[in-house]
Image (cartoon, rainbow, N blue to C red):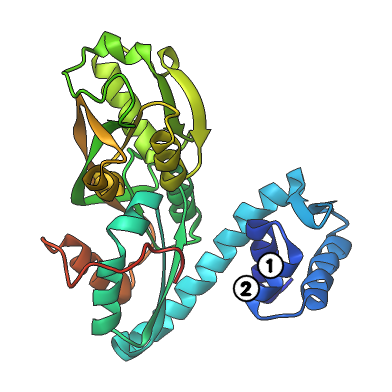
Amino acid sequence: MTLEQLRIFVAVAEREHLTRAAQGLGRTQSAVSAAVRALEREYATPLFHRVGRGVMLTEAGRIFLGEARGVLGRAEAAERALAELGGLRRGRLSLQASQTIASYWLPRRLVRFQRDFPQVALAVRIGNTAEVARAVAEGAVELGLVEGAVDDPHLASETVAHDRLVLVVAPGHQWADRVPLTPEQLLASGWVLREPGSGTRSVFETALALHGIALADLSPVLELPSNEAVRAAVEAGAGATAISERVVAAALGAGSLVRAGFALPTRDYTVLVHREHFPSRAAEALRAILRAPGEPGAEAGASLRSM
């Protein structure tokens, strides 16, 4: 088994598609298929179900994925240790951030990092809070950035910024008059929510609990896997939602959404690292930028999707 086979397996598992994995790796589809088949044949274990043009992990593949990510993470750590001898003149820093942070807060700070350390490559992934925490714990990435609470004894956390959730509705909604709402009135509307594992959902659930309301008491109309999908559904009149103020700032300014009369708490933006892993100098340099107050540089022109 080689590291290259593991990289190919992880790429196919994450994309659930051989052709897209090959494109992302800069390889031919036949080479990617051959590498997967070689693993399955060598260990007599099917790793993927072939479903139409895509693939899905088998149970064995799902278990192996965590191990493969961990091995690749440890290999990266070995490379980093050698690269540290030359300072920050070269290297690679891998991180994963939750959607709100990755799209609305992180890009300008990554631009600042790349200006300061142009020879250090950044590899950025996006996931919800649960996915980010798992990636750091498994060693798949060195740094994680999340909004939700994380309880994992393997991880250390540091607060670097804050954000506020706001309750928003479409202009035609019954709460668009901005009259202050009681907690009980929150039960009278349909809701558009982020998926389980999302930091936004977790913080909202905690805020409701402070008023004696369980998330299950609400009437969810839709559960969606991205901030943009939630915002679009609420703009279309699907119901109310709790969402980052950063995500809906433009919509509030344009009048396509209205802030309802119910205050929600601020939440922390948190950096996650593995307690037992030696931090790279690149990671420490980025953390120093993340801690810095204010907004570095001009607004990023577009949301971060990948780097």
Instruction: Say if 65 sits above or below 122 in the image.
Output: above
> Alpha carbon of mark 1 to alpha carbon of mark 2: how far?
6 Å
Q: Disc 1 vs disc 2: Cβ atoms closer than 8 Å?
A: yes
Count of labels in the image:
2
**Looking at the figure, which quarter contains the C terminus?**
bottom left
Q: Amino acid at mark 1?
A: Arg
Q: Position of residue 42 (x, y in %)?
A: 86, 65
Q: Amino acid at mark 2?
A: Gly
Figure quadrant of residue 213: top left
Instruction: Give left or right: position of 212 versus 221.
Output: left
State whether residue 17 appears in this view: yes
Q: Position of residue 245 (x, y in %)?
A: 24, 43
Task: Identify which residue is drawn at 84% across, 72% down.
Answer: 34
Q: Position of residue 86 (x, y in %)?
A: 33, 91
Q: Residue 24 got which mark?
A: 2
Q: Could you tell me which secondary element the residue under label 1 belongs to?
A: helix
Q: Position of residue 175 (x, y in %)?
A: 27, 21
**Which one is in front, 302 or 25?**
302
Q: Residue 20 got which mark?
A: 1
